[in-house]
Amino acid sequence: QMLSSEDKQPQISWGSWVLRRHKGAWFAEKKVQSHSYQIQWSGQSILKLPNGDLLKFSIQKGQGLKLGSMPLTIQSRLDNPICKPFAKRPSKTMKKWWQEFAIPAHLRMDWPMIYCGSELAMVPKLFICE
């Protein structure tokens, strides 16, 4: 596995640890079970996700998401939505954005994605969709 081609993502498990390759470098990490989740946000300033991560919300006039009457839902990656986060840039699938931002594949399934109704609105730490 250590000699597999560059586009592969080999991993070696050892006890409670896993050794993963990303962009040619090897990383040792504690094993973490992936969690699928879908949580409706009810206005709290801090939301603890099933994987233990915290999402912090604050109100800032003229920045961030414009809250309307549609409910905000935070969910793990369940599909491969298309979004356009930047003006003058094309719409792309999330898989392409993950690759462009160099997010390792094993982190993508637990990354929170914020939906307004059924539309992807924001990917925390990466971008807000237009």
Image (tube, grey):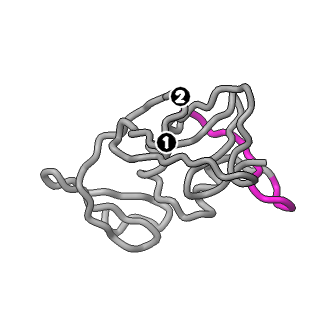
Q: Is residue 114 above or below residue 31?
A: above
* 52 sits to left or right of 91: left
Write down the residue under mark 2: 42
Inspect the image, locate mark 1, and give the three-letter code of the amino acid beneath it. Ser
Q: Quadrant of the N terminus?
A: bottom left
Judge by depth and name the residue closer to the eye, 118 or 17: 118
Neighbours of disc 2 within 10 Å: few (<14), some (14-19), many (20+)? few
Q: Are marks 1 and 2 in contact (CB under 8 Å)?
A: no
The stretch of residues the image draws in magenta is: 78-90
Real-space CA distance between mark 1 and mark 2, rounded to the nearest whole angstrom: 9 Å
Residue 59 picture location, percent across and down = 62, 47
Amino acid type of the residue tagged 2 in the rendering: Ser
Compare residues 103 and 67 and report the one nearer the observer: 67
Residue 103 on the magenta segment:
no
Q: Is residue 85 magenta?
A: yes
Q: Estimate the x, y position of residue 77 in percent, counting from the top left.
A: 53, 38
Task: Residue at 60%, 57% (x, y): give it.
Answer: 126
Question: Dominant secondary structure of the magenta stretch?
Answer: loop
Q: Quarter-wise, where is residue 73 in the image?
A: top right
The label number, if any, that marks residue 45 in the structure image: 1
Residue 84 sits above or below residue 7 on the image: above
